Image (tube, rainbow, N blue to C red):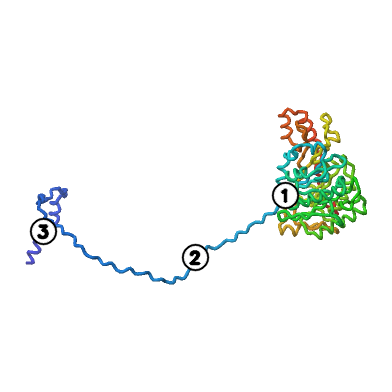
Amino acid sequence: MKRFFVRYFGLLLLLPVFLFSCAGTPEPIQDDYFFPEAVEPVEEDIVLPEEAEPVEEDIVLPEEVEPKEELISEVEPIKPEETEVTEIPQPKRLVLTFGGDIMAHTPNFSIKDYSLIYKDIEEILQNDDLSFANLETPVHSGRPYENYPTFNVQPPYVQAAIDAGFQVFSLANNHTNDQGLEGMEETLSYFQSKESEGIYAAGIKKAGQTGITWQLIEKDGWRILFAAITEILNSHNNVNRIDYIAPNSERREQLCKELEEIRQENPCDLFVLSVHTCEDEYVHAITDLRRRLYRSFIKSGVDIVWANHPHLAKEWEIFIDDTENVENGNIEAIAMYALGNTISGQRTNPQFNKPETNRDYTGDGYLIQVVLERLLPQENELHVIEDTNPIPEKNFRIVSVSPYLITTYIDPQGQYIIKQLNETFIQSLKDEGRTTWANYLAERKKLMEKINAKYVHIDSLK
């Protein structure tokens, strides 16, 4: 056995080598797999079961069960957290317009429709809160219209001014007594009947009344104290019924004390004083005495001094804390020395070739519009003027002082009407072929624009 194993062991080792060399490279597999032949399906008759008729059965529904009332506690919906929005308070504004003299010469009251007089300035008067005018005539319905020197009008003439937008009237002037005591009582009665319509007047006293009169006007949360005095009268009869102040230093000192007391006894936001001046008419110059007088009124508590009588316009002073930076300065008070005629018949013969003639200034005037703004609380704490005789602490600022130039124009029908004296009106005259009037008023406009505001530092009030 051992010999057999040795003899054939070598052959066994060579056998795998021999088999591997005989095998060679394998050939790819051919797709000749055998599939059995397809068997055609055998059709068979399918016997369906006969359709069974439905069997009707009584369906018993369960009895309706009433829902049980359950107590459900109301649960408040969850609200989103509310964010507090802090509104920035807006200062409350007051707009005042100041005019000049409303005269009543024959050409003025002869017009058939008095509303035409004011038509062109209604847009100014009706877009403010209060408009002021000096009515230089009594109002007596039982007497005819009268011209200079003893004026009188009937209610329709004044009503036209009211309808146009004037609400506050000074009745104290040198023509207050033109119709005597009866004329003053009729005038006072007329304006008292208008108070329920928001029309105010001052300057004539009731019987037995002492001291100067005043009106406390409440307008949109503002309190405006208004008084009117005259320093000149054409007749001193019944002087005790007029707010007349004799033009001497002693009486003026008494007046300043009286103004102070009125201001203290009647809490207000604003104090307006109308002054009909004792000075020459048709004179542009302002005396130092008059400047000092108006400063003394302001120191006594007046915020706006509004003067008239010369029948022509004069400059107005704006008291401010920074005269070098007027746009950002604080305006403390205003003094208007004269605003001229708002309407009159004094320029009946315009000097077309000499528009600078002094008499021609009676045909032009100004409307001055003052915008005031109430101070916010934090501002009010800082808005105090320190002085030995201080101006009362204010709760407002004067935002702007804007002039509107006006003229009394004689239209082609001979009617004396107020027009705004601006480029638009002058151009309209040229378009209508009224070149003489156009050229004349163009020159008048240049002359009037030389009369304007003067800024004065508030230190001058000390």
Q: Nearer the viewer, residue 158 or 189?
A: 189
The first of marks 1 and 2 along the sequence is 2
Using the image, determine if residue 444 lies above or below residue 266: above
Height in image: 146 above or below 3?
Answer: above
Q: CA distance from mark 3 to mark 2?
A: 101 Å
Viewer-proximal residue, 140 or 87? 140
Disc 2: which residue: 77
- Mark 3 highlights which residue? 11
Task: Give coordinates of residue 14: x percent, y percent.
Answer: 13, 57
> Mark 1 — residue?
129
Mark 1 → mark 2, Cα distance in angstroms:
49 Å
Measuring 9% from the left and 64% from the top, which residue is drawn there? Answer: 5
Question: Dot 2 surroundings within 10 Å: few (below 14), some, or many (20 or more)?
Answer: few
196, 39: nearer the viewer = 196
Say left or right for 422 vs 212. left
Q: Are marks 1 and 2 in contact (CB under 8 Å)?
A: no
